[in-house]
Amino acid sequence: MTAAWRTSGEIIHETRHCRRHGRGGATVAKELQGRFDVTVLEAGKEFRPFTRVPRVEAIKKTGLLFDAREIQLVFPAYRVRRADEGMFLVNGNALGGTTTLCTGNALRMDGDLRALGLDLDAEFDEIAREIPISTAHQRRWRKSTRRMFEIFQELGLEPRPTPRMVDDARCIRCGRCVLGCTTGAKWDSRRFLDVALANGARLIPSCRVDRVVIEAGRATGVETRQGFYPADLVVLAAGGLGTPVILGNSGIACEPRLFVDPVLCVAAHIPGSRLDREIPMPFYAQREGFMLSPYFDYLSYFFSRAWRAPAGDIAAIMIKLADANRGSVSTHGLDKSLTGADRQRLQEGVRICTEILTRFGARGDDVFLGTLNAGHPGGMLPLTARERETLHADRLPANLYVADATLIPKSLGAPPILTIIALAKRVSKLIT
């Protein structure tokens, strides 16, 4: 048998099975190796955490950093592209995909899937046995974090500690999860990939997939920059921005329903707050259409001129928006902008964050905004109730599957890692 799939950069192929290595791809590789011979084709290179923050801070003081895309010059693991209205889309471009750059949050966000009749309880139970998830970090919160949690409570926001995929005993609370974990405390999808490799899978880095080759209604393999990889089964897991492009190049149209989960941070100059040295998103509050959470945004700190104060004197709160399913990506480019309703929800979030920061000690004229960015794309091949048993769209050849956020019906406005892993596990079970 042969299978092929791709995530953020790899492709796995079994007897030939191809895939890319983010959360979905790594999960499928782990689950299928042994049943198939798996080859992982990874678009990126080996991941290394970013440790040159002092150097970038020195460059920042010169005023030479003004465009978020410049981060790629010093940290190639980031890929940053510009969408409409000044919004930047961010994703990982190295082994491990975006999981190496995320905050390690483990929220179960499958309500829309459950509404379709898709029950992933068994898969979430498996995840709980395989990945360390806890809220033990709450015991180590800084005084400023505890005070902010109290303010959320005072405003009736019902905050909850965020479950995280982190070994708390190894966490040094550096606050730089999004730049890569230097101690190995944070789980990322390389753990699953390592299991697949230990069981016989093969890894080919720097191998980007262009299209799936389809002949007589069946996928026969994938075309990459390095050549053709044959496969009896293809599972694409190249992420919400990568998979639709590969499908489009393969003659399979996706839906113009791209969501990206935009993030806007509201911040204030509050000397000694030291929230840059707190774990990112230690707790969260869910509102209608968006989430709020304390979060020091390094993209804003490096590139937004409003973030002039030293990192330790900036307190920031993230608004993570569940944006409208409207947009698309293809080889011809990216088309994504916020709707009027999206902007209204952002404004409401800014109002609430301003009230929180004022109670935290900021003056009204001390409040400023961060760089609008987004990093959770998906939705362009959304699952429907008809597909709840097969997780396979009719437009795909029978031996071509998708195992990433492209399947998620609507923007979650919340970290999707756990939900994507659960979907990938179910896809793996359906492959025979």
Image: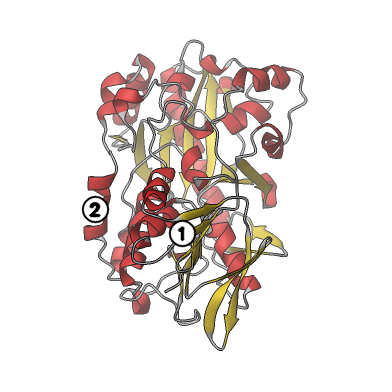
Amino acid at dot 1: Ala
Front residue (pair 279, 410): 279
Residue 368: x %, y % from top left: 59, 27
Mark 2 and mark 1 lie on one chain; the one further toward the N terminus is: 2
State the residue lying farthest toward the top: 272
* Label drawn at residue 432: none
Q: Which residue is mark 1?
A: 405
Q: Quadrant of residue 329?
A: bottom right
Q: How is the image coloured?
A: secondary structure
Closest to the camera, between mark 2 and mark 1, is: 2
The image shows residue 327, relative to residue 354, as above or below, that is below
Q: Which residue is mark 2?
A: 126
**Residue 300 appears anywhere in the view:** yes
**Residue 239 appears anywhere in the view:** no
Please report the residue visible at 57 percent of the width from the left and 24 percent of the height from the top.
51
Does 329 sit left or right of 25 as displayed?
Answer: right
Residue 299: x %, y % from top left: 60, 33
The reply to whether callout 2 and callout 1 are in contact (CB within 8 Å) is no
Front residue (pair 129, 178): 129
Picture mark count:
2
Please report the residue visible at 52 percent of the width from the left and 47 percent of the height from the top.
97
Does 205 sit left or right of 158 as displayed?
Answer: right
Q: Residues within 10 Å of mark 2 (few under 14, many from 20)?
A: few
**Mark 1 residue element:** helix
Q: CA distance from mark 2 to mark 1?
A: 19 Å
In the picture, the quarter occupied by the N terminus is bottom left
The image shows residue 259, relative to residue 353, as above or below, that is below
